[in-house]
Image (cartoon, rainbow, N blue to C red):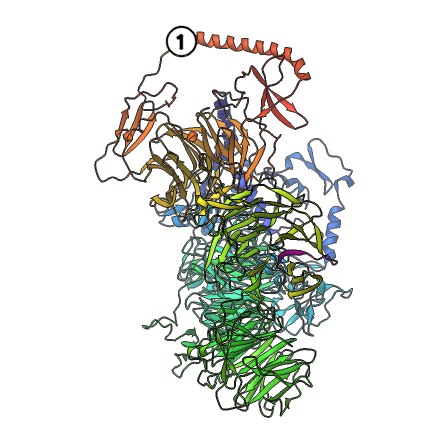
Amino acid sequence: MVHALIQLLLCISILHEAFCDDVTDLPDILSGKNDHHGRNNFDAGTLRSSSSHESTYSKIHRDKQEQLTNRMHRENQGDYGIMVSVHHDPQSPISISHKPPSYPNYRFGPKSPMHVPSIHDPIRSTFGIRREDSTYLSGILTRDKIFSPNDDIIFEEDAILDSHHQSSGSSAHECDLKCGPTEFFCSKSCSCIHSDLHCDGQIDCGPDAEDEEECEITEEMVKKMKSECEGNTLSQHIMCPNTFICIKQDWLCDGDDDCNDFTDETHCGSKTNCSDDQFECNNGLCVPQEWICDGENDCRDGSDESNCTRTCTSDEFQCLDDSCISLAFKCDGEQDCEDNSDEMNCDFPLPNCPEGEFKCKGSLGGMGGPGGRCILQRFRCDGDNDCGDWSDEENCPKRSISCTSNEFKCDDGRCIPLRWKCDQEQDCDSGEDEKECSDIGVNNRECNDDEYTCKDGRCIFKSWVCDGTPDCKRGEDEADCDVKCDIGQFSCPSKVVSPRERRQNYCVSQKHICDGHKDCIQGEDEENCPTIHPCTQGSKCQQLCATNVNGKEECACKVGYVLAADGFSCNDINECEFTNNPCSQTCNNTVGSFICNCITGYILRPDLRTCKALGGAVKLIMANRGDIRQVTLSNNQYTSIIKGLPNAIALDYHYEKDLLFWTDVSADVIKQSFINGTNVKDVIKWGLESPGGLSVDWVHELIFWTDSGTRRVEVSTYDGKLRAVLAANDLDKPRAIVAHPGKYFVFWSDWGPNAKIERSYMDGSERTAITNDGIYWPNGLALDFSTDRLFWADAKHHVIESSKLDGSDRKKILSNNLPHPFALTIFEDNLYWTDWHTKTISSANKVTGKNFRHVHEGLHFPMDIHSYHKARQPKFENRCAEDRRKLKGGCSHLCLPNRTSRRCACPIGLTLLEDQKTCTSVPDKLLILARKKDIRIKQLDSKNPKEVDVNVPLDNLKSTMALDWCSKTDRIYWSDVGKSTINRAFLNGSNQETVIQDGLVSPAGLALDWITNKIYWTDAGTKRIEVSTIDGHQRALLIYQNLKKPRDIVVHPLQGIMFWSDWSADPLIDRAGMDGSQRISIVSENLLYPNGITIDYRNNRLYFVDAGTHVLEFVNFDGTGRNRLIADGLQHPFGIDVYDRYVFISDWDLKSVLMADKNTGKDRKFIITETSDLMDVQVFHRDRKNIRNPCGKNNGGCSHICLLSPLEEIPSSTLPSTTCACPIGVKLTSDKKTCKDGPSSYIIFAHRTDIRQISLDIDYMIDVVLPLPQISNVYAVDVDTLTGDIYWADNIEDLIMRSSSDGQNVQQILSESMDSVDGMVICSVSRKIYFTDAGRRSIEVSELDGSNRKVLVWQDLESPRAIAIDYEMGYLFFSDWGSLPRIERSDMDGERRSRIITTELGWPNGLAVDKHKKNLYWTDAKLHHIKMCDFDGNFHHTIIEFRNEEHPYGITVTSNKIYYTDWKTNALHAVNKNNVTSRTIIAGNLEGLMDVKVVDTKEKLERNSCGSNNGGCSHLCLRKPKGFSCQCPTGLKMKSDGKNCEDLPNSYLLIAMRSGIGRISLDTPEMFDVVLPIDGIHGAVVLDYHYNKNYLFYADVNADAIKRVNMKDYNDIKAIISTGLNTPNGICVDWIADNIYWSDSALKIIEVSRLDGSYRKTIIRSELDDVRSMIIYKNMLFFAVWSNIARIERSALDGSDRKVIINSDLGFPTGLAIDFMARKLFFADALHDRVEMADFNGEKRTKIIAHAERPFGFTLTNSYFYYSDWYNKSIIRVARHTNGVQEEVRHNLRGALEVRSVSSERQPHYFNPCNESNGGCQFLCLYIGGRKYVCECPNFIDRPCKREIRESMLKPPDSDETTLPSIYHDEPPVQRSNDSSLMLAILIVMSVLLVVVICAIILLTCNTKRKEKNKARLTFSNPNYNGSGSSGYNEDPGKSTFFKRFKYDKAQDRVYEEKVLSCGQETASSTMMSSANPSPMPSHHNAILSTIG
């Protein structure tokens, strides 16, 4: 009651304060209402009531504050007006000083009291107000009715300083005047006035008017203002009720907002009330209901946008604080929700990459992730997308850029025009362009004829002079200006204020002339006003009659007319021709007035001036470099659409298709996604260098873009498949671009030295510059489709301008507040733009530039921006509509609109036929050009003189060098020396594939044998010439001797010969047969850098270019006839080809491709210019000669590769012969046709990302990359010598793989429960895998297929690494890298473990066994040596001592050789055992060499000691020195027979790992996890089990199913619930009634069914949020609910008797568990990082584990508590009866979510009437307590069913407490008398007092002895809970606790509870869980977890 009383008093206080501050304090006349009879009740001078909680006074004061703040009123100007003193305290009243001598000069405005500045306010514009009505005049607060182009212009800056000094010179302390007690002191004028004159509304203190400052509006002031305005009954004025503005009565309902809140324009005419489908604003306006809460202030007073709430959409994620983010940001590695709930329970990235490699971000935007692969460090910042997400190119140094002679280079490498140096404008980011300038600081350049020179030397356009806005810093461009007024307006004359100051003339609208208010400063508009009177009969006046001041009669006209020249007639004024159009879109003049209209898609607002777009509120989408954001105009919030972008610049969208497009200049790509950020894909990813502008044509479905790197404007279809170039010449730095589908125009801006804005039709025709004067940095472009005007922003001149579409009628919109505008967009009447300098989005009126405001601030780097609304993409005629053949515009390919119709265009390589619609089907003569980053094609015989080269759409080109082609397949082939690959694709870029990627280093030359379909290449890195089949499957080595730096290669398959150039110290050009035979040198003199070579097949000549001698030569095939064809004009020739009569050459330095006559070298012509990074050049044609393929029949009889061999005579007319070749390292058999299956003896070694083989059968030692699947980081490798299968361990992917040597049969052997497998060995005899795992600190074994896995050694291991075996001896050897390095030996079953080497060890990396001599070898990288000993550790000595601190790693030995890998030398070495000083490198230049083995298939294996029947063992049979032993897999116990293993552990843990289910046996001591072999698990979050039936149940949140698994047969899997599930996040099994319960977080229900999923029933569906964990005890169901107020509830098993038992101090409750003996409920809190306990009513709540790191699941056994750490993916246990130390049982699991303890004790048998025959129920039997149970009906049943409550005949045991308060209990409550209750209360009080006294005595007695003996034991019990039975929470068995107390241990910084048994005894036990045992890792409370996904 006390609490309720306090709450009541608080409410009364709040209400009192609210009502006291509201309108009740105003006089009655200020609380009037509308009379609803045609107009507002203005006659009473009333204020409209407001629904706001703030007082009307506060609203008025706030409005005045906003007015003055927004208009930047200067206090020292003018001699009358209203001054507002703004206090720092927002709660303080705002004081108003009244300066005018009489009321008619009071002008309040312009904002209405309810105006909400944060809401988009389209009405806050000057449309509908005449030009003179747009701003304030000299700081006077008006109704926005006076036009002043600018405030008073101060000619000199020192004038400001002078005025400042003058005002500050008369401070109060300089005045000695003393005022009397009834006087007010005027400090500034140093005078005294009577105190009654203070705040009387009149100025008495002088011009400073300090007596009227800090005054509040009073009732008297309101009355006075009303009286002065309305005067008497003859007055023609009326006062606005809310703004106090005095207006003429004639202005009511005239269409103009004169009151500035529209109250004078509401309830006009016959319409007095809003209709049912309208909303009535507080000011009386009516707006459609759908405009409510759309983010726009349509009411003008903000009332339509108040009390708005937002709900998340289906593609958004709702944070726990109810805010919404994009669903794509869930688990992206970045915090988007304030509470971090979007990152809960997500998979986080793997650790770092190995040394020398870079970790990519991967799929989780900035946080790495499973997709975050490793790349070589040398690929970092090389300009290529090696990571796939461009994360390797982030934060890279600026690329070197060379500027031209007329440009200035900024420090960041950017080039600006030289004329911008020292122009007093900072153009470089760091301002270096304005450093080292002259002291005068004046721009040295002279202004042009069309420019005006400011006094500081700055140049502005003459069109900016006298435009109303000062552009010179001192404003001299606006001095001496005469403003021209529109017809009917009055021009207030200019006035010279001082020699330095002049007020210019300005205009007053016709409506305000002679209206009784002075609008001119001197009141000229109110002078000489005639007197209007009724016209007399016979008057000639057409409208009004008047008498002027001289008493002369004359005619006058009404507003909207002007007197004609005859002096009698009135002519209509065309307001639509005013300087400022009164309408925002279309204006129609009417007689005496005008009517505003809107274009299609818009509707006229209630103001009758502006237009509102139909279709909901507008949003802004903006590129912010690192992300793309969606900004809401109603507040300052945004939603990221896409994050983790490298450098997003330009964007656009297609509204109807929900498509978003953007460019990325770091990735050089154009991308597309849905507008919600999903389904991201590349559209254009080739041929781009710096795509800075983008525009979408939503009608013809085209995208246009500019590229300042390629200097092109291009167009393509939405999918990027069809593409064309619109402009490629006379462009320097094209930037912004915008398309007008309705006019078929494309506009783009160019930043070049001659900046311009150009326009063409969409096919590139009729290109013209529409604006090229007076622009410098034309950044943004935007189109206003309603007015057909083009807008642009100039970042150099800080201006936004507009023009008509042809460039005419150019107008300046805004030149203030524009430090560096970048992009702009338009919506309705407003402009929106981004600014680099202010990091904001700003807006202003699109016509006047007024109403400037910041929409969004604090941006990272705002780039492009667009208003997102369907009205921005109106419907236009589609000139490319599909015809009946589904062809757009009838074109076979690309359709581009133009002036009259459309033009068809063709894709790469194709030409348009004569019908001008259809493209050729195949390419013909093409020039193919290789550049480093792209491959280009150009038509050679094009009829179009403007034909340009186009890019072949190829991906991920790194450094393209050599080219060739095949006309039979229309394919191109190229080598990439950056990626060390050979690739191919069709000419159109499709079917791109890598042909050869292994064993290449620098494939510089490439040639295609088009007869036998072979690829030849040179490799300067490996110094080889090789050949392969055209698909790369078969490969042979041709030449490897005497090659230094082979460059280019060509083949002549008609004669079986090939040529190549070599850049050796003695450069040469050689020739050999195409099989490598008959090698000779044909050119060896006068060569420097012989680059490209080519063959003239007609004349049998070899052409070559030399980059050193700069010449082009040719020679005959035998070396004779050498001729220098071109000796001048070449600078760095590189590529060359010959076709027809011409030779084609690419030149690096000329940046060109030229052609010349192949015989004379004349007729030179440049066909490609200004193109850098030129490489090879080839001419594609169809004239290659074909002959019969000698290898065509049966592959020439060869088993592998058939090669052409040279003829006897060259040239010759006969066919070449053939030769058979074998793969590298494989020999031919004696028939010279067949190759052996493989080498019989070889070395195999791991090279991080590949595995290589070196044959020992042949005389050369060349490593060959085996064709295995992609490898991330291989550490260990070995071979099964029986099958030849290769096994390897990848310790990034954490798996062991197996494959055949040809890579065809690949299998994953082990992938679960692995951390870091560093060592592995295959026992070919026993068919076992032995491996070390440094992460799990274990040595394990399994069968070769991965089955029967067992942990052999796990104790006393720190970092096991190398491993080796000797099967003959039965020994297992392994090294340990721990703090005490050692080498150990054990039997091969892990028994008899012993340390054989413990001294002189540092980093024992590799181990190898010499099986013949029984010695052990090892490498030590820290001590830099290789040592050996015998198997007992004896004869320990050094074999090799490294002097240069080498880093040996892997090692293997043969009978006479030692092979080892070394990280420092990056090589594989061979050492002769008999001469260790003789070391050779057999494979070098290889980073990251790891394990190495020698395989000899001819070596005989030992006999398997387990025999043919596996030694009689049921599972593992392992070798021992004397026989074998039978072993069980991890976690299983051996049966008593010593041969057979148990099927399951008796006691174990089950763990939900998301993508799997783990088991940890509690029967065996190792406690290692085993992932159960269950297929099809995708999202296992929660699980439970049925012990007796051996069933496992789990819910899969990804598959939306609940499945059942037979634990004795993991193939027996059944989905028991697979429909009607959305997110099953809770599950529990009733093991007695055989029912299963589950929750659905999305559907917010709890259901039950039988164990097979039948008879499904929803038991709880109301008031549920996110149910996460469930547990059953007898008749009770407990479940945890995640919501705004988290809670734990309890119900009966049928869902009845539902009760919230815990709902305070909870974060994310999960992991419910029951202690059956103690009858306690346990639960974890994943937010608060703790585990607690309570009774079943939620009482006696106790912290059991106060510092549990991110717990999710929890379970318990008799001895331990276990919980899962979802973040670190580990299982932690805590002993129940010890000091509470937390022990990590397992870590680095696949996942760690729910955990259950499985044993017979965890599912005890207790009374349940449903146990027998389902309680007699036909469907579901649900126990509800006592003897009662419910026979429940399923949700859906095809036969009659009735729900029944039954009672069992059996009686539960007395010990079974199963009764809950229930509606089913019909026993009446026991009634007790009041006397009995009173007696009982007295007894209880007396007993408590007695106990307290006794305890106090004992405490005092024992206190002394405890000081002497103060030892305590810590347990997990708590003083608030006394368990009973054998639970052991508070007491040791057999001992009783007498009393308890808390103690503080200062040394441990903890508080614990001490239980004392007797005075003379020591403390028996203490209970605690506090900071004494903190978690080993910091708690991240913000790491919120989730199980969805």
Left/right placement of residue 1260 relative to residue 1512 reads right
Residue 1445 lies in the magenta-colored region: yes
Left/right placement of residue 1844 relative to residue 1198 reads left
Farthest residue to the left: give it. Answer: 1840
Q: Given the image, on which type of amino acid does mark 1 rest?
A: Asn
Residue 1848: % across, % down: 28, 23
- Relative to 1879, residue 848 above or below: below
Span of residues in magenta: 1444-1455
Which residue appears at 68% of the width and 42% of the height?
205
Residue at label 1?
1874
- Relative to 1375, residue 567 above or below: below
Residue 1096: % across, % down: 55, 88
Residue 1529: % across, % down: 48, 43
Which residue appears at 41% of the width and 69% of the height?
700
Number of marks in picture: 1
Q: Residues within 10 Å of mark 1 (few under 14, many from 20)?
A: few
Residue 956 lies in the magenta-colored region: no
Displayed quadrant of residue 397 = bottom right
Asked if residue 353 shows in the view, the reply is yes
Residue 1580: % across, % down: 43, 44
In-front residue for pair 874/1797 = 1797
Element assignment for label 1: helix
Displayed quadrant of residue 657 = bottom left
Displayed quadrant of residue 64 = top right
- Relative to 1571, residue 840 above or below: below
In-front residue for pair 1064/576 = 1064
In-front residue for pair 978/480 = 978
Asked if residue 127 shows in the view, the reply is no
- Relative to 731, residue 875 above or below: above
In-front residue for pair 966/638 = 966
